[in-house]
Image (spheres, rainbow, N blue to C red):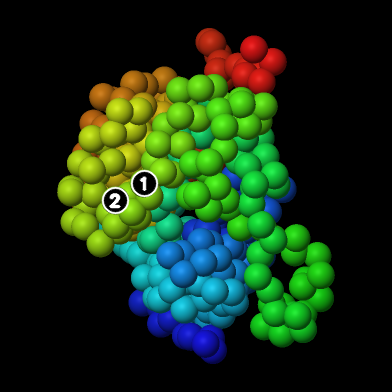
Amino acid sequence: MGPIDIPLDGPLDLRSTLSPLVRGNGDRTIRLAVDRAWLTTRTTDGPATVVLTARPTTVTANAWGPGAATALERCRHLFGSATGSLADAPDDPLRRLARRHPGIRVLRTGSVLDTLVAAIVEQKVTGSEAHRVWHGLVRRHGEDAPLPESGEGLGGSVHSGLGLRVFPSAATLAGLPYWSYHELGLERRRAELIRAIASRPGPFEAIVDLPLLEANARLRSVPGIGPWTAAEVAVRALGDIDAVSVGDFHLPNLVAWTLAGEPRADDARMLELLEPYRGRRALAVRLIEHAGRRVPRYGPRLSPRRIEAI
């Protein structure tokens, strides 16, 4: 199957839009440049490697591997609403940010299982802990990404240095014994949750075709998947432009500092500040995260743990 062109309804900042899919430095499932991205995915037809090239009015997508056709079809719906739509925001700080960064978009990857596993890995731990587990799973239990032998379409000289890998299959995740997760830094509760989900991936992958409320309800019906995890899946895999990750350690402070100049906040205050943007709160949060304003640091901080040493 040849490349496809995806028309854009406005500006696209490709690297910033795709950055939430990067799990730390050295993530071998994705590589980003200013106007080009290389990423791997797993579909019901098998693994695929996708290359996206951004142009002023279109994105060209090409793919290789058994799952290439499905991956390209997902690309048609990858880029949702853009932060430029917040240029009429009622709050001056957000309005200014939207005009400065109009091309950041909420994603709809359609890849539910790996997004859900990544969110479970990130539950209630530091980013460095979560990234170490993700990298370990990809390195030890994933597989080399399918690539054309010639490198044609991949961006020339980058072909030999990509080192891309595909995240482990559901069958592999379900078949791993608990200790395989433990030695990567994942305690038993989250490891068993991943194993249980991976043992019956169909109902989870199918939520991409459900209305968002039904998809959220299906996710949250599973013990161990709460509002934070469900929102993380919704805003990356399902294209939900209103999902808010309630229960995040840092996000309430960041939202409050950006919108109200308040260095500390809880979930209730964060939701209060985001209420004027109901219907597009995920877009507002992505814009705030991208702006990266530094919140004053004081008080307790979340410390990393070494689960595998327990």
Numbered circle sitting on residue 144: none
| Circle 2: residue type | Pro
- Whether residue 74 is situated above or below residue 235 in the rendered picture: below
Residue for point 40% across, 76% down: 73
Residue 305, picture quadrant: top right
Question: Are the residues flagged by discs 2 and 1 in contact, CB closer than 8 Å?
Answer: yes
Residue 115 spot, x, y in % from top left: 45, 48
The residue that disc 2 covers is: 203
- Whether residue 61 is situated above or below residue 103 in the rendered picture: below
Numbered circle sitting on residue 200: 1
Q: Is residue 4 visible?
A: yes
| Circle 1: residue type | Arg
Of the residues tagged 2 and 1, which is closer to the observer?
Answer: 1
Residue for point 52% across, 87% down: 1
Residue 259 spot, x, y in % from top left: 36, 36
Query: Would you say 71 lies left or right of 274 here?
Result: right
Query: Alpha-carbon distance for marks 2 and 1?
Result: 7 Å
Residue for point 54% across, 74% down: 66
Residue for point 65% across, 47% down: 141
**Quick one: SS at disc 2?**
helix
Front position in the image: 113 or 6: 113
Front position in the image: 286 or 91: 286
- The quadrant the C terminus occupies is top right
Front position in the image: 222 or 200: 200
Residue 50, picture quadrant: bottom right
Residue 201 spot, x, y in % from top left: 38, 50
Q: Is residue 20 visible?
A: no
